[in-house]
Image (cartoon, rainbow, N blue to C red):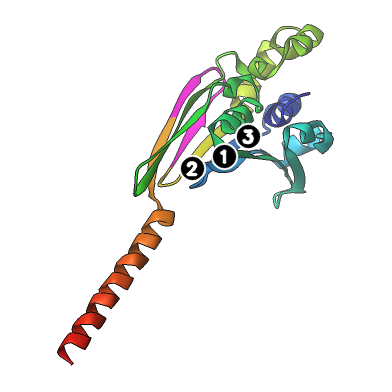
Amino acid sequence: MRSGAAALVLAALVLLTGCQATVGVDASVGRDGAGTVVATATLDKAAAAHVGDLKVRAGDLAPAGWTVREQAAADGGRVVVASRPFRGGTDFGRAMAELGPPFAGFTMTRSRSIFRTHTAVSGAVDLRKGIEAFGDARLTGQLGAGLGLQPADQTALRQALRFKLSMKVPGATKSWPVSLGSRTAVRVSGASWNTDVLFPAFLAIVLLLGLAVLMLWRRYN
């Protein structure tokens, strides 16, 4: 089974010089440690014409919890979105790894004090092998080195294909441009107030103050 982003990226192998495609990966972590990983492939009009029907089947991704939708872009291009919810740090790392080998090894940690919760995400996107990083041994065996692309085509692909990564945790958001042939370190951390503790505490303080005012009023009246 090929993962969501890998399927979208490998579909872009038919791009020709002058076409443009952007693959965006956005991960959002909520206050409870749950969230969503979204991979979006945006093809311009020329790229969409060369790609044709992407043949991305939602059934191929369903076992891992991915859903896929496709729509036309206003400029005549196409947008394909694969999304997967996660719950907790272990599931987050699994969801990121399912995007393909370049996204393996991501971690999410959370530490909670009485009033605040700190969340941190770290990892790296490793594209030092170029587009081959998204392939597997079987695909390489079928297509050959460079997934069958000539050096000139590989150069054109590096110019045409753009990656963007965004991570959002409670209290912080960061984005990174990611390039074929490079390794990009990723880390973001933030903190949020524990409203489940603060609200009851605030309510208790208000009630105590109200009771104190009432007792004083009765004492002097």
User: Which residue is drawn at the image coordinates 60% and 42% (left, top)?
Assistant: 36
Q: Which residue is mark 1?
A: 26
Is the residue under label 2 in contact with that under label 1 (CB below 8 Å)? Answer: yes
* Magenta segment: 173-186
All told, the count of numbered labels is 3
Between marks 3 and 1, how big is the CA–CA gap? 10 Å
Q: Does the rendering let one see residue 149?
A: no
Q: Residue 88 appears in which quarter of the rendering?
A: top right
Is the residue under label 3 in contact with that under label 2 (CB below 8 Å)? Answer: no
Q: Is residue 6 magenta?
A: no
Instruction: Indicate the amino acid at tag 2.
Output: Lys
Between marks 1 and 2, how big is the CA–CA gap? 8 Å
Q: Is residue 93 left or right of residue 202?
A: right
Residue in the foreground of this view, choosing between 24 and 102: 102
Q: Which residue is mark 3?
A: 23
Tell me the SS state at disc 2. Answer: strand
Q: Which residue is mark 2?
A: 168
Instruction: Indicate the amino acid at tag 3.
Output: Val
Locate the C terminus and report the quarter of the image it occupies.
bottom left
Q: Callout 2: few (<14), some (14-19), or many (20+) C-alpha neighbours within 10 Å?
A: many
Is the residue under label 1 in contact with that under label 3 (CB below 8 Å)? Answer: no
Residue in the foreground of this view, choosing between 50 and 173: 173
